[in-house]
Amino acid sequence: MLRPTLQTLIRQIKHNPHYTIDPRLPLSGMMTLFKERALAYVRGWLRRPTLAACGGAFFVGRRVQLLNSRRMHVGASVTLEDDVKIDALSAEGVCIGDNVSIGRFTVIECTGAITHLGKGFRIGNDSNLGDYSFVGAAGGVTIGSQVLIGQGVRFHSENHVIERSDVPIKVQGVTHAGIVVEDDVWLGSGALLLDGVRVGKGAVVAAGSVVTADVPPLAVVGGVPAKIIKFRQTTEPQA
């Protein structure tokens, strides 16, 4: 009886009626999981008053840093794993949708320098950021829903101006165009997205790729710089 009860509880937490536990998972493993989740829930409950808004259960790992959290809007069933750092200082702040997880040691930085307030970061429902990812959201980074993001993925929504050679690059200023990742995208581990790119709905970016130009919907791209390899099927395969 204990396993079905845990199944029901997890489905409620995940807001997903189809979520199931692998029947091979031992009871000891489940109890360890629930212990860690309970501690994370308590830490999240203590952080809730510091946020601009929180739509439901909030799970916070160990050593998490939330700076300028009054500019953070958090949905339901959001998980920030151990050692995450989010600095929401920006014009639009940080908006995290329902059932989003942000992996260990991930950094989200919305303003690169206080001489120019950044735009901010937004991620939609049921998406995730893998461990050790970096989001530089000075120019704005928007990630859609149902997006899979592997470990060590980097977003840089800012470029340095380099037109003049008679003055140092660091004093020539920066440009911001922003980065957009549409719904149902998979960004492989180690991918790098540069300022101004848009990744279309249903696209796949191979691990280690450097995205310097827009990716069409349903395209599979890879390489440095990323090039189109093929397009995904748009219809069900024939039997």
Image: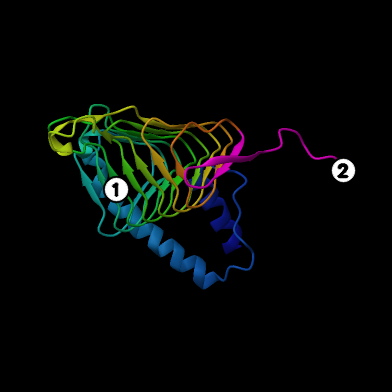
Q: Secondary structure at mark 1?
A: helix
Tell me which residue sits at (35%, 53%) in the image: 41
Residue 216 or residue 186, whichever sits in front: 216
Tell me which residue sits at (52%, 33%) in the image: 215
Residue 161 or residue 12, whichever sits in front: 161
Specify which label sits upstream in the sequence, 1 or 2. 1
Q: Residue furthest front?
A: 166
Tell me which residue sits at (27%, 27%) in the image: 92
Using the rendered image of the protein, determine whether residue 233 is visible from the camera's viewpoint. yes
Whole-percent x, y for residue 139 in the image: 29, 31
Residue 236 part of the magenta segment: yes
- Which quadrant: the N terminus? bottom right
Whole-percent x, y for residue 65 in the image: 23, 51
Whole-percent x, y for residue 43 in the image: 28, 53
Whole-percent x, y for residue 225 in the image: 47, 43
Name the residue carrying label 1: 45
